[in-house]
């Protein structure tokens, strides 16, 4: 029997406490809605964590027991401690999966993992979005058809300043004239990173079953696969083959 | 007439001042040897900069006038100011090319651009290296044959903890039994990054014409191509097409 | 002094001889319009070839003297001899560049080089297209801005059944709701392949300066870079290093 | 409950009937040894097929019921009917996985899927090979350590004339001085292709548990994922959005 995938959903949990519109859509917070919503599409053991908890709810022990970390942030990126962002990066390099949702493109851990500005164009005009499926044979696309249509969405437009994705799975069309690389994957260290664009605090996008399936599939695909930590530099003193000067010392 | 490519060669310049062996090979410093050596293989306007200069010789004005920055560091990575490392990263994202040489895999700017640990295996045993040419049609491979042989080298072995390269151009074989992705490229923002493995402070590798050609070709290929800075987020208020709610305000 | 790039433009040249609309836009054929149009954007030595010429105008001598072959076909893909298609493929593997324009997605040489069906969605409805620039630092994007707008175009929609491109440079938005990977590159053997979507026989798209620049930049980028033919299998009898059984014979 | 993966193992089955050395290692044929050997590392329902059977044992019904086809060929590539090779290609584009083993680099179906010559260097000298693991977080690498060592092997050396792999998972070091991209993946249509280099008819490589695990993992990873056939071109007459000329007819 395979074990449930241990998922931690992190939410800054700011909008929901301040804004009536957001609260009406996500009364218990985006994290709780996601926790409920993705459970239908995978065998997960889920916990949640938020900004105001000690260490933002993300100590090393939690992360070491997390197979995939899902991240929602928007208004409070700068309130996340640099130390926590670096810890998340480190744990991804050690093998933890990381799913960046929507405005997490500007979150500290995502930017550290990408190495770029992660800038983009945006517009909030309740316009239509259609996400086209470019790679139907990818596990993240399991159960996803030719496209997903979202009636009202915030627009994100290219050029999205990310490293070339290892895999580009979905591309969005927007009513207002833009396109966007909306579902992308990267390998970082021993971990796997997925960016999933859809989502918004003032729109019920995380009540959409197709989007929840996309997030769930991403969480399953990106799960921790190696438990070893082989990040450290290894000075191979015992060479595998005969070498001319096996005992030579590095000058520093 | 095309203009010369403006290259800045940065060297920590530490080993050469302390160690007789290194000084005997690179009497004016690795940076000066590189400056002389690559000139044969490109139309360059070259300046150099070192750790002990104010701002490590790398202010914003210098970098804005640099088409490609070549980086050598080994013993003093941690003496490079975080602020300078971030500035270099920012200028790459704005379009400056960056060539990381050999032990620059652990330099601060390279690690910021990669987002990974950049760890690897290594061994100093004067062994043989053979770099195989995987993509002869690439400009960086112009004038490079089927392989380059280096009689005595320091070994770097996989797994090299880097993001999947956009392009993998050369792969090394080592006498002691390892392999290594030795010439790799990535796009980051508007800039281009190349990692070139060969080089060592106690071996005359930067006197090898084939290696100098490789560094020169990399510097030419990675040169600044766009002078605009479009990194900032653009809230597209004037939509290109008709949208439902053109005047809606972002809640934060 | 660098030599002009030797470009051969191939056109089936069928529509222009049969259809008044097409002839009114391309009176001397699409090949002649392209030859004139791209000359502004590169240093080219151009010849043309068409279906009805002997060997379709494409003998081995012509192709060996061609740095980049530009291909337009639409109505007569099946009239191209299999032998010619295989010869073009072979010459690309030997180093010749290949630019597939618009409906050349279904041409025999392009399909041989891709290995896939190259199927797509399409619609002819005079709708608007906007091509977004995903990689401004790429030579093919030199002089191209944030996007190119085409007022009236034929739509091509995803999923485009191609191998994952080595580089994805432009992505199209269509008024009718689709997206498309419109400028893509691949390496094949020693040659470079570019697919450039814009173009149509009944619309004046190859009079558009931005599109002509795109085709010209592609032709320059994909030019032949290696004159060697190292495709053959090499049974390395003289090993580079000592091996246990250097004289062993292959059983077949 | 997930269903067993339906694997078909194809072997030309020529060497084993002619050569005593080969027969002593693979008395029932390489296909039977593989069938037994991979069963330990996955939940497979396996059948085999060989060259001399009618249609080489590979009719459309068989392939439509195959989730992954494993291919061994060496001496008789040219005896495989072109029609069968094209059928295999077509079925991969429709979603069937394809694993090319060792000398299958020169098989007809593999070459059709790649679009390149698939040439390489080789040498048979009973030398040592070490395959290094470049991407430990990939499912094909499950259970594989830092490297796999093979005491006696046939050498394959770069440049291997393949399209840039979508994923490069293992890289080989050879005693005689070469390197090779030994485990590579590509997406083609709705199917997934893996090349796995290790193997040889005169050496007991398919008795090696690590190599069997690699083949089994590849077969699992590449399994058919989509049952739809959406390869055909779709003329989208009913546009998703309003377009200017919805009823326009294509001129041919």
Image: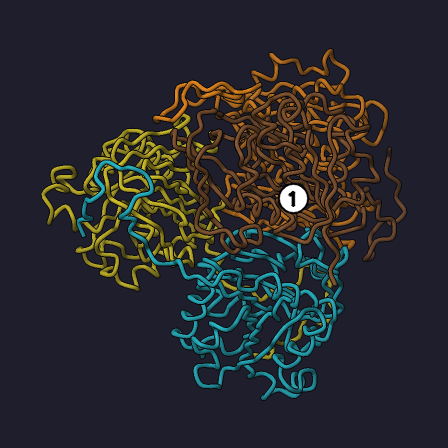
Chain colours: A orange, B brown, C cyan, D yellow
Q: Nearer the viewer, residue D158 or D32?
A: D158
Residue drawn at x 62%, y 64% as measured from the top left: C220
x and y, in percent, of residue C107 in the image: 50, 70
Residue drawn at x 63%, y 81% as measured from the top left: C32
Q: Is residue C172 left or right of residue D187?
A: right
x and y, in percent, of residue A159 in the image: 73, 48
Q: Is residue D63 left or right of residue B163?
A: left
Q: Chain of mark 1?
A: B
Secondary structure beneath label 1: helix
Q: Work out which quarter of the rendered image holds the N terminus of chain B and state it.
A: bottom right
Q: Please determine whether, in this image, residue A209 is positioned above or below residue D16.
A: above
Q: Please determine whether, in this image, residue C9 is positioned above or below residue B96.
A: below
Q: Is residue D178 left or right of residue A9?
A: left
Q: Work out which quarter of the rendered image holds the C terminus of chain B and state it.
A: top right
Q: Nearer the viewer, residue D16 or A59?
A: D16
On the image, which quarter does residue B11 sit in? top right
Q: Return the residue at label 1.
A: B36
């Amino acid at each position: 029997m395979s074990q449930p995938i241990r998922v931690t959903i992190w939410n800054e949990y700011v909008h929901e406490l301040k804004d009536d519109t957001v609260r009406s859509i996500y009364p218990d917070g985006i994290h709780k809605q996601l926790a409920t919503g993705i459970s239908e599409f995978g065998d997960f053991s889920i916990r949640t964590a938020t900004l105001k908890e000690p260490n933002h709810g993300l100590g090393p022990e939690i992360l070491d027991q997390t197979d995939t970390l899902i991240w929602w942030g928007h208004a409070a990126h700068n309130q996340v401690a640099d130390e926590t962002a670096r810890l998340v990066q480190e744990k991804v390099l050690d093998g933890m999966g990381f799913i960046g949702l929507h405005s997490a493109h500007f979150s500290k851990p995502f930017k550290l993992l990408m190495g770029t500005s992660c800038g983009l164009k945006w517009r909030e005009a309740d316009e239509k979005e259609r996400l086209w499926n470019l790679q139907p044979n990818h596990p993240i696309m399991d159960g996803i058809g030719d496209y997903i249509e979202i009636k009202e969405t915030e627009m994100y437009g290219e050029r999205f300043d990310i490293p070339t994705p290892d895999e580009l799975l979905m591309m969005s069309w927007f009513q207002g004239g833009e396109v966007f690389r909306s579902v992308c994957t990267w390998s970082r260290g021993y971990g796997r990173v997925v960016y999933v664009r859809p989502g918004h605090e003032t729109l019920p996008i995380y009540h959409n079953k197709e989007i929840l399936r996309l997030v769930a599939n991403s969480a399953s695909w990106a799960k921790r696969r190696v438990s070893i930590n082989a990040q450290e530099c290894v000075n191979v003193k015992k060479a595998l083959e005969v070498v001319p000067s096996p005992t030579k010392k590095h000058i520093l």
